[in-house]
Amino acid sequence: MTLEPAPKVGTLNRIDGRRAITIDADLAPGYLADERLHALLEAGSDSLPDGLMVNVAGEQEDQQESMQFLASTFMIAIGLMALILVTQFNSFYQAGLVLSAIVFSTAGVLMGLLITGQAFGIVMVGMGVIALAGIVVNNNIVLIDTYNELRREGMTPGEAALEAGCLRLRPVLLTAITTVLGLMPMVLGINVDLFSPALGFNAPSAQWWTQMSSAIAGGLTFATALTLLLTPCMLVIGVNGDDT
């Protein structure tokens, strides 16, 4: 038997009855925590001894909880929107058409983050997608409601879709343009000091909202084109399967 000196601890920590060791680390400048954490877990997953497992806590655990909460909130919001839309339009097809615009607008969210060079943050981008859903739904509701009114007046589907697009062009564009322009100070990271007065760039308070504002601005710009071009076309295509 050989005795070898080794470090000794005065306290043994256990979680659910299992011996636990907590390792803390700081992130080097210029790296993303999520990307470095995934790389670390992938590198060490094949070399762990038997009986040893790794659980990630701290910021990663908080992000997972926030993601689950935002996902459940988003699904509840979509369900309530679908219920109201089917009740008002009396058409599953038109309700699905409105809700599909929310899914398509996520492409604009990703493009907005890519253009501004922002990382995909679970909390702020998730809140931006939920806020964007309400704006996108409103634009599509106004256009489809105008289309249904014109159809009840006796117009053909093609004529009604074309006329509805022309009538709602200015309101939809004004809503989108004013919203995007209103978000531009946050997208660019500009904050106003009213006491100096002076303009600042990339202050901590401005950086907090940059991801959410970039997601909304990019998604709304993309969804506006879909609303004015794709929605009237889909109304004409699906006229034979419309419940109304």
Image (spheres, rainbow, N blue to C red):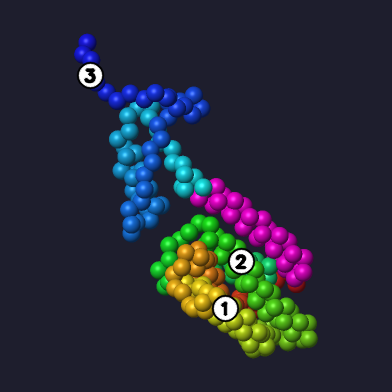
Q: Nearer the observer, disc 3 or disc 2?
A: 3
Q: Which residue is mark 1?
A: 182
- Give the alpha-carbon distance from disc 1 to disc 2, as whole Å: 15 Å
Report the quarter where the N terminus lies: top left
Q: Which residue is mark 3?
A: 4
Amino acid type, residue under disc 3 in the picture: Glu
Left or right side of 156 for 9: left
- Image position, residue 37 (x, y; %): 38, 48
Seen in the picture, residue 237 relative to 126 is either above or below; the reply is below
Residue depicted at x 52% and y 74%: 193
Q: Nearer the observer, disc 1 or disc 2?
A: 1
Seen in the picture, residue 94 relative to 72 is either above or below; the reply is below
Residue depicted at x 51% and y 47%: 62
Q: Which sits earlier in the primary sequence, circle 3 or circle 2? A: 3
* Residue 158 can be seen in this image: no
Amino acid type, residue under disc 1 in the picture: Gly
Highlighted range, magenta: 63-92
Amino acid type, residue under disc 2 in the picture: Ala
- Give the alpha-carbon distance from disc 3 to disc 1, as whole Å: 68 Å
Q: Which sits earlier in the primary sequence, circle 3 or circle 1? A: 3
Q: Choose between 24 and 238: the one closer to the eye.
A: 24
